[in-house]
């Protein structure tokens, strides 16, 4: 069964910590995405990547960076975590030429910054 | 970017068809309509997508109007497990690398 795996289901970090959220997909997909989801605001795109070592900003990139050193892995980095980054983080992947393919999402990481 | 408008919430009786509408009046000719759903505390799940023609798969049917300005997702026999937030999304960008922009979705409550 193909899937997107996020390394942690729940995570609690302190303000100012550097936080890494890891996402791995086993479908050989070219495209990977990071979203955050907050009540009343829905899913918002943070960063995405179309290929290894490539990245593009989404709608809310401030305070985040990403890394894609290998095709299967896309990491979201919070350089200095703040309480307003408490959220549910969702990773997704899709195939290039994906007009005929859907996105596959991971189960999410619920991050709490205290 | 083409935007979508969906009702905030809907109810449906178990065993009946659930019809979820979506307006996308500014859709352009090469943009697809996608439907996803999100069950509480899980990641969104792909349901179906279409361009012009009606589509059906094991989960649902998608009816797109001839002018493509609106569509309807149909769950033919809703069950309690279909209770979820349903997102109608128009795919932006090139066909190779288009990103999905999620709106607020419709919260479907299936009742016994």
Image (tube, rainbow, N blue to C red):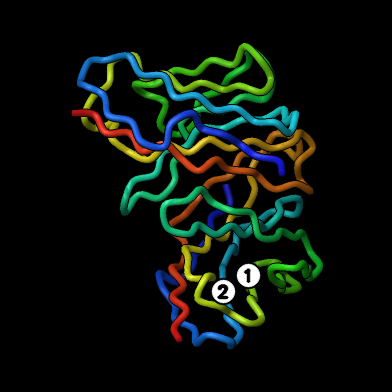
Which labelled disc corresponds to residue B70?
1
Estimate the spatial distance between the alpha carbons at disc 1 and disc 2, rounded to whole Å. Answer: 7 Å
x and y, in percent, of residue A21 in the image: 44, 24
Q: Give the residue at x 62% y 11%.
A: A69
> Left or right of A51: which side holds B106?
left
**Residue located beneath label 2 in the image:** B21
- Crowd class of label 1 (few under 14; some 14 to 19; many from 20; radius 10 Å): some
Of labels 1 and 2, earlier in sequence is: 2
Q: Give the residue at x 63% y 72%.
A: B73
Assign a secondary structure to mark 2: strand
Between marks 1 and 2 in the image, the one whose residue lies nearer the viewer? 2
Q: Nearer the viewer, residue A80 or A23?
A: A23
Q: Give the residue at x 50% y 76%.
A: B80
> Left or right of B48: which side holds B11?
left
Q: Give the residue at x 26% y 24%.
A: A13
Label 1 resides on the chain identified as B
Q: Compared with residue A4, is residue B31 higher up or lower down, i.e. above or below?
A: below
Q: Nearer the viewer, residue B7 or B82?
A: B82
x and y, in percent, of residue B49 in the image: 71, 58
Query: Do callouts 1 and 2 point to residues on the same chain?
Result: yes
Assign a secondary structure to mark 1: strand
x and y, in percent, of residue B38 in the image: 50, 57
Q: Compared with residue A90, is residue A14 higher up or lower down, i.e. above or below?
A: above
Label 2 resides on the chain identified as B
Query: Number of callouts in the render?
Result: 2
Q: Nearer the viewer, residue A43 or A20?
A: A20
Mark 1 vs 2: CB contact within 8 A: yes
- Crowd class of label 2 (few under 14; some 14 to 19; many from 20; radius 10 Å): some
Residue A15's image quarter?
A: top left
Q: Compared with residue B6, is residue A21 higher up or lower down, i.e. above or below?
A: above
Q: Nearer the viewer, residue B28 or B74?
A: B74
x and y, in percent, of residue A103 in the image: 65, 44
């Amino acid at each position: 069964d193909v899937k997107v795996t996020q390394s942690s289901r729940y995570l609690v970090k302190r303000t100012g910590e550097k936080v890494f959220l890891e996402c791995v997909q086993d479908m050989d997909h070219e495209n990977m995405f990071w979203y955050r989801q907050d009540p009343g605001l829905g899913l918002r795109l943070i960063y995405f990547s179309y290929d290894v070592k490539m990245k593009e900003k989404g709608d809310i990139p401030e305070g985040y960076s990403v890394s894609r050193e290998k095709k299967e892995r896309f990491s979201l980095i919070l350089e200095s975590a703040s309480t307003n980054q408490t959220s549910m983080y969702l990773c997704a992947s899709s195939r290039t030429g994906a007009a005929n393919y859907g996105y596959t999402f991971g189960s999410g990481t619920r991050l709490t910054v205290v | 970017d083409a935007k979508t408008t969906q009702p905030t919430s809907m109810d449906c009786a178990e065993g009946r068809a659930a019809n979820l509408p979506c307006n996308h009046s500014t859709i352009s000719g090469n943009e697809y309509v996608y439907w996803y759903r999100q069950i509480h505390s899980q990641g969104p799940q792909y349901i179906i997508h279409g361009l012009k023609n009606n589509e059906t798969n094991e989960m649902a049917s998608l009816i797109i109007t001839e002018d493509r300005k609106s569509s309807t997702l149909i769950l033919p026999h809703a069950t309690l497990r279909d209770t979820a937030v349903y997102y109608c999304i128009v795919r932006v960008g090139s066909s190779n690398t288009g990103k999905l922009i999620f709106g607020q979705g419709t919260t479907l409550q299936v009742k016994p």
